[in-house]
Amino acid sequence: MRFADIPGLDEIKGNLIKCVLSNKIPHAQLLQGHEGSGNLVLSLAYASYLNCLNRTKIDSCGECAACSKIDKLIHPDLHLVFPVSPNAKFTGKDVISANYLNEWRSFILKNPYQNLNDWNNYYGADNKQGNISKEESRQIIKNLSLMAFEGQFKVMLIWLPEWMHPSAANSILKILEEPPDRTLFLMVSHQADNLLPTILSRVQSIHIRPFSDQEVEQYLVKQIQVDETRVGQIIQLAQGNMREAIKLIGSLENDNQDMFQDWMRICYTLDLTKMVGWSDQYQKMGKVAQKSFLQYAMNMMRETLIAKVGAHEIARIQESEVEFLTKFESVMDPNKVDKLTAALNQAIYHLERNANPKIVFLDLSLVIAKTLKA
Ligand SMILES: [Zn+2]
């Protein structure tokens, strides 16, 4: 993870970089921010920066051996601790992070903006609340006391220290206050209010603000390649919470998918009562969602044409769309696709110029019904 992989938050990145360049690296830092904030990714980028073999004044290189190991979360000097609870595989003293590390790695590499619930679901916590146990604190002390270093700094990254058992928290107080040379703690908390005062007093706190809408947009468009037409709706709903934004990508996609398929069926059966009902519903969706839905319909026209001519290698459909598309394609031809694409385009044009959405949608439904039946 490089700082450049994280959208915005320039002021915080700048401060972290300054610590390293001026050689004033705090031995224990707490990056606190709500779930969906950038605190974990910043910690990982910071760990890379600390150990990078070719760092510049603004970022790690992302390519050296240290960077690539931290990227995969397998650097031997990056120690990872997080809440765990017994599951089908581990109980008792085996309930420590090291035994769940492979799962945690793939969980975080898939999406580093997730929360504790996501994690519990991911590894199949047995309905018991996980924690960072007393046994875990012994491992922390043991791992940090081992002298072996591969990189320049040993980093103990504790994800969600608010779930540390009080006895575990008490046992690490001494090492937290005076860690061995070139060893530092990075705590990444979603609920720092729940941390014990004895921990809080031993760490330097950094508040991570939520992402701005522009930062969320930047991430969705550049890193995840979300269709720009859907980004507006997502950032409006996510309110700076990146976890929420990433979740919304999937659910909006599904909403549009279900809605589109229902809509085409209604048009095909020429059910006027339902068409009018749908126009009312459409009116209530809000401008961004209305546009996003029509944009989805446009994409489906493209896919229909691709299916029609058998150019499957350039298709961009999801598995859940295949069945519908096969049927839909059988009642379509290139001429009809052209007509509907033009009608959808025109509807978007009118919406952008503040036409009444209900009327636009009803008109559109009638054009579609007529075209499908032709
Ligand atoms: Zn590097």
Image: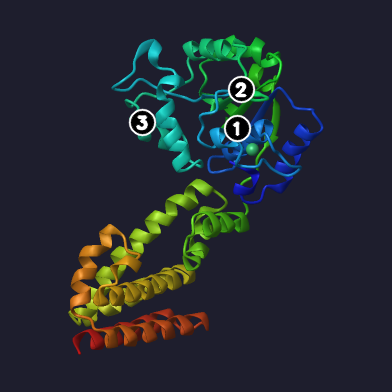
Q: Residue furthest right?
A: 22
Q: Name the residue under label 1.
A: 66
From the viewer's perspective, is 321 left or right of 95? left
Closer to us: 73 or 104: 73
- Asked whether disc 2 touches disc 1, contact meaning CB atoms under 8 Å apart, the reply is yes
Q: Name the residue under label 3.
A: 123
Instruction: Provide the secondary structure element on which disc 1 rests.
Output: helix
Q: Tag on residue 150? A: 2
Q: Quadrant of the C terminus?
A: bottom left
Residue 190, can we see it?
no
Of circles 2 and 3, the one toward us is 2
Q: Quadrant of the N terminus?
A: top right
Instruction: Provide the secondary structure element on which disc 2 rests.
Output: loop
Q: Quadrant of ligand 1?
A: top right
Closer to us: 109 or 293: 109
Amino acid bearing label 1: Ala
Closer to us: 308 or 297: 308
Residue located at (29% from left, 68% from top): 312
Residue 346 in which image quadrant: bottom left
From the viewer's perspective, is 26 left or right of 253? right
Of circles 3 and 1, the one toward us is 1
Residue neighbourhood size for the residue with mark 1, other residues' Cα within 10 Å, grouped as few (<14), some (14–19), many (≥20): many
Q: 209 above or below 295?
A: above
From the viewer's perspective, is 171 left or right of 361? right
Amino acid bearing label 2: Glu
- Between the C-alphas of marks 3 and 1, the distance is 28 Å
Residue 103, can we see it?
yes
